[in-house]
């Protein structure tokens, strides 16, 4: 399975192409659109979310609600493109006067600290930051969320669920772990938090930053229930499941750190208190009284819940602009402003779910394979029965191991 995305922030659309999906997977537009809507919601979002009402179009690979086994192409249109059609036109500009007028309309030449602006300009040798801003924008995550729901159709074969919640925004933070079942309530919160008292402090932090022309970040957690053991491998460093998840989450704009399980606290504990003891019961399989490893040991899933956390930095577009340099004059200038948000942490949690789904679907298809849903299901059932015989525990459909 492979996922590619394309499109610019103010171009006609963003799109994804997913190849390698087995035939016969159920795909519902309403489910994809529901996730796209979740991504757009959240306290602290900016004006762009009032313009866009993301809906997916299916261009290939699906017939009558089922995958065909051929590449699937999804498109999410950018409604705001109507206001940018001249600036983002793929056609050559006319005379010098027309070119100057079109380019100056949305020109940005002072890079924002913390954004891809300057690094991208140095890489692609351009003073026109529009060439960098458009593709490095988080607008690409709409395509990723759509692709994530295609991946969820693979996870559905295995009965795997993915959920998320917001742990903290600035200094407003939960001081306790959150059970998987409780995470379902996070979707009803405009800050993605399961505790309303903490959520109120999160909103206050966002309001304070907005008043100051500033931005805030935070921490999110993604949890996965039902992932069978043996997904991923330590045979090559590129194939370790925790490494793949970390790379996928780090690829999300504004994510600056990723941990698996209690990884952020692991360096402050002794091994005797950190590592999860192993037990065995014939009716349950292998058991653990704790899950500090986050469901992954040695780069391989161990049958426990997979838990990953990500730190989301404050986004770099500040209304109270930071000092920068104008690339036209090379003189000091305030950083450029693009229409932006005050806080994207709740949206980052939704995008993180999508990236986790994509990685897990890729890894599951590598392990079990199959050209159709029926084959994939049969391979999984066969492997589960073989594991049960090998280790001497009951093979129940509801059994994680």
Image (cartoon, helix red, strand yellow):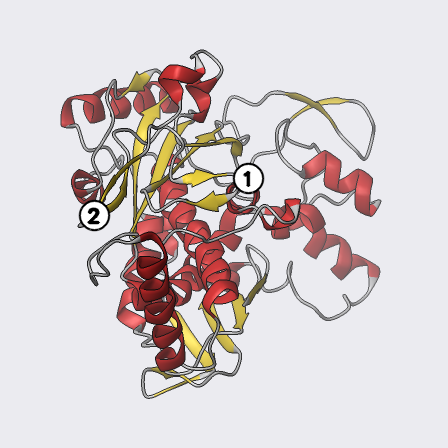
**Residue 20, horizontal then vertical, whole percent:** 53, 74
Nearer the observer, 127 or 182 = 182
**Residue positioned 69% across, 23% down in the render:** 324
**Residue positioned 49% across, 77% down in the render:** 72
The residue to which callout 2 is attached is: 284
**Residue positioned 56% across, 42% down in the render:** 243
C-alpha span from label 1 to label 2? 35 Å
Disc with the residue nearer the chain's start (1 vs 2) = 1
Q: Which mark is residue 388?
A: none
Question: Can you say whether 247 is above or below 111 in the image?
Answer: below
**Residue 353, horizontal then vertical, whole percent:** 38, 48
Mark 2: secondary structure: loop
Quadrant location of residue 262?
Answer: top left
**Residue 85, horizontal then vertical, whole percent:** 59, 64
Q: Nearer the viewer, mark 1 or mark 2?
A: 2
Nearer the observer, 71 or 53 = 71
**Residue 329, horizontal then vertical, whole percent:** 83, 30
Q: Residues within 10 Å of mark 2 (few under 14, many from 20)?
A: some
| Total marks placed | 2
**Residue positioned 34% across, 34% down in the render:** 44
Q: Which mark is residue 250?
A: 1
Quadrant location of residue 388?
Answer: bottom left
Q: Is residue 66 left or right of residue 246?
A: left
Quadrant location of residue 125?
Answer: top right
Question: Can you say whether 74 is above or below 328 in the image?
Answer: below
Question: Can you see residue 125?
Answer: yes
Q: Is residue 222 left or right of residue 199?
A: right
Question: Can you say whether 183 is above or below 175 in the image?
Answer: below
């Amino acid at each position: 399975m492979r996922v590619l995305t394309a499109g610019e922030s103010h171009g006609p659309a963003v799109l994804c192409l997913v190849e390698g999906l087995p035939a016969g997977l159920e795909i519902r537009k309403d489910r994809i659109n529901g996730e796209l809507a979740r991504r757009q919601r959240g306290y602290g979002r900016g004006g762009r979310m009032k313009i866009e009402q993301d809906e997916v179009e299916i261009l290939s690979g699906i017939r009558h609600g089922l995958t065909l086994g051929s590449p699937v192409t999804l498109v999410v249109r950018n409604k705001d493109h109507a206001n940018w059609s001249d600036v983002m036109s793929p056609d050559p500009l006319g005379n010098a006067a027309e070119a100057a007028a079109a380019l100056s309309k949305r020109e940005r030449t002072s890079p924002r600290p913390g954004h891809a602006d300057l690094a991208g300009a140095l890489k692609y040798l351009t003073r026109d930051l529009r060439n960098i801003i458009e593709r490095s924008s988080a607008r690409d995550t709409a395509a990723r969320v759509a692709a994530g729901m295609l991946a969820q159709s693979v996870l559905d074969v295995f009965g795997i669920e993915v959920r998320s919640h917001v742990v903290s925004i600035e200094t407003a933070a939960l001081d306790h772990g959150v059970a998987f079942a409780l995470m379902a309530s996070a979707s009803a919160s405009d800050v993605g938090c399961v505790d309303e008292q903490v959520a109120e402090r999160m909103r206050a932090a966002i309001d304070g930053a907005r008043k100051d022309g500033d931005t805030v970040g935070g921490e999110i957690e993604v949890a996965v229930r039902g992932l069978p053991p043996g997904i991923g491998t330590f045979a090559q460093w590129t194939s370790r499941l925790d490494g793949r998840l970390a790379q996928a989450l780090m690829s999300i704009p504004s994510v600056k750190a990723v941990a698996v399980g209690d990884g952020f606290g692991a360096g402050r504990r002794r091994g005797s208190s950190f590592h999860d003891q192993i037990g065995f019961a014939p009716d349950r399989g292998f058991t653990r009284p704790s899950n500090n490893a986050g469901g992954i040991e040695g780069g391989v899933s161990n049958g426990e819940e997979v838990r990953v956390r990500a730190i989301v930095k404050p986004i770099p577009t500040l209304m109270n602009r930071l000092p920068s340099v104008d690339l036209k004059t090379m003189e000091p200038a305030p950083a450029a402003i693009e229409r932006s948000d005050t806080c994207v942490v709740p949206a980052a949690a939704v995008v993180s779910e999508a990236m986790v789904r994509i990685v897990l679907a890729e890894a599951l298809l590598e392990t079990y394979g199959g050209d159709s849903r029926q084959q994939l299901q049969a391979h999984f059932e066969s492997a589960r029965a073989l594991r049960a015989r090998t280790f001497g525990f009951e093979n129940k459909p509801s059994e994680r191991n």
